[in-house]
Image (cartoon, grey):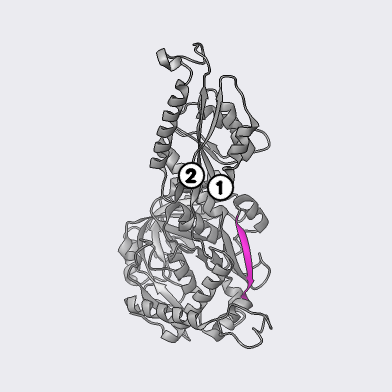
Amino acid sequence: MITKASDVILKVRPVTSGVEHRYYYEGPCRFGTGEALEPGYDRLANAQKAEKFLTNLRACAPKNVEILEPVHLGRTDDWENPEEQWERVAQAMPGSDVLVIMPALGTDDLVLELVERFDKPALYSPDAITGVSNAACLRCRPMKEHLVYANLTWQQLGFRLGIFRAWKVIRTTNILLACRFGGETSYSSVDTFNNYDAITARFGVHFRQLNVHELLDQMSPAQPGGNHTTPGRDTPDLTEADMKEVEALADELTAGAEETEVSREYLINSLIAYVTVKKNLELRDCRGFTVPCPDVCSTRRINEMKFTFCLTHSLLMEQGIPSACEFDVSCVLSQQALIAVSGMSPYMGNGYPLVMMDNGKLNVRHANEKDEATLMVDPTNLYTIQHSVAHRRMRDPSKNEPFALRHFAHDQQFGAVLRYDWNRDAGQVVTLCRFSPDGKKLFIAKGDIVGGGGYEKHNCSGPVFIRVRDQEDFFNKQCEVGMHLPLVYGDYTRELIALAELFGVEAVVAK
């Protein structure tokens, strides 16, 4: 099944702790008056502290964070540490993604041992000053680099829970790669990840490969004896139910489009590709997709079958499923990072600066005279992100915006593509990011939409134009990661920096 980022739940295990004094006495480790010094009082006081801790934790937890039943680490002033207690705690650990700990004076060694034993990410309650010492101690322990954070406020703790949920989204992501040649080889995108094993080791992401000829064969009704590439095997070929879904989608898109300049026949062909890819994502438990455009195009099968994968990418992205052109696996994971921290639906495309040429014009493509005139009002610090994979839900992941349907192939007019008029969103802030080919850096930037182009055009157009703070700085830092840049609406710079830190990735932030 496709478990989208929005379906991922972070499971948080609260951990309370406390000491119970067995005798009446005062000193440097105990102070109070009256009944507060009597045996039995600590049990009541610790319970009240724990209830307040749990109330605050539940209140600060963001969406898609589940607060599990708490576990307790306790002892008396005999300083015992029985293994029986650890056996009880161990039963709760398998279902826990992150621990949120309420430390207490006299139990610091227990919570340190808790993290050491079970190697779980840990966040400390802002109500306990010893969270600072615990975090400092654990971060310096040999052999392991623990993900441990003290927190200044409950609001900060809630923010970090959201980042840990994004961390879990990344770590549980499987990406479907439709390959023609080797699994990491493509003529499409040389700046994508260069070592999948290293990416899996760092991020926990796994890759599921599917031969693109098998994928293309599945776009036709099943034949007796199996497909040409897999004779005699049962394969997930096009079914009557699939075609009903395709026809319904075609009706929905044509009814909703402001303009339609692609034949229904060719729209159907591109929707068959989408349904086939989505079925393979479900069969392989993947939540990301990419396919090498030139490698597949050169087989001539796309021309023969009269479709392109552009609409597949658009329809997946608008559902919050990362999908990238040109076998750009890095772009898929970068989209996933944006989706995980924002809940928005991404767009992606070639990112390049718009600069003044010797003829006094910008090096802009896919724009009409009106669009160019808008850019020339202030031609400074402009960038463009351009591909034919815009969709209906970039501004609001729950609402379809106006769109048009065009075709990709100039001459034969096949390959349905969606067009979006970016000019209606001038002034909107967008956040962009991209992982470097070795996965060790994450480029993070933001800009303001100035306008768009290519709405009335065909082929691989439909750019959005944005203004960045410092074009040269943006470009120099982009050169560390690659060309395709995914984006989402809104400013999520802080969240992406925090996510990079969790993975031990250098955040390369544009000015």
Q: Left of 370 or right of it: where is 224?
A: right
Image x and y of residue 494, in percent: 44, 45
Kindly identify which residue carries mark 2.
68
Residue 463 percent location from the top left of the image: 42, 67
Estimate the spatial distance between the alpha carbons at disc 2 and disc 1, rounded to whole Å.
Answer: 9 Å
Q: Amino acid at mark 1?
A: Gly
Callout 2: SS: loop
Range shown magenta: 205-213
Q: In this picture, is 45 found above or below 7?
A: above
Query: Which type of secondary structure does the marked residue at label 1 adopt?
Result: helix
In the depicted view, which residue is nearer to us: 146 or 332? Answer: 146
Q: Is residue 342 magenta?
A: no
**Is residue 260 placed above or below 50 in the rendered structure?**
below
Q: Main secondary structure of the magenta part?
A: strand
Residues at badges 2 and 1 in contact (C-beta under 8 Å)? Answer: yes
Would you name the residue on which mark 1 appears?
A: 95
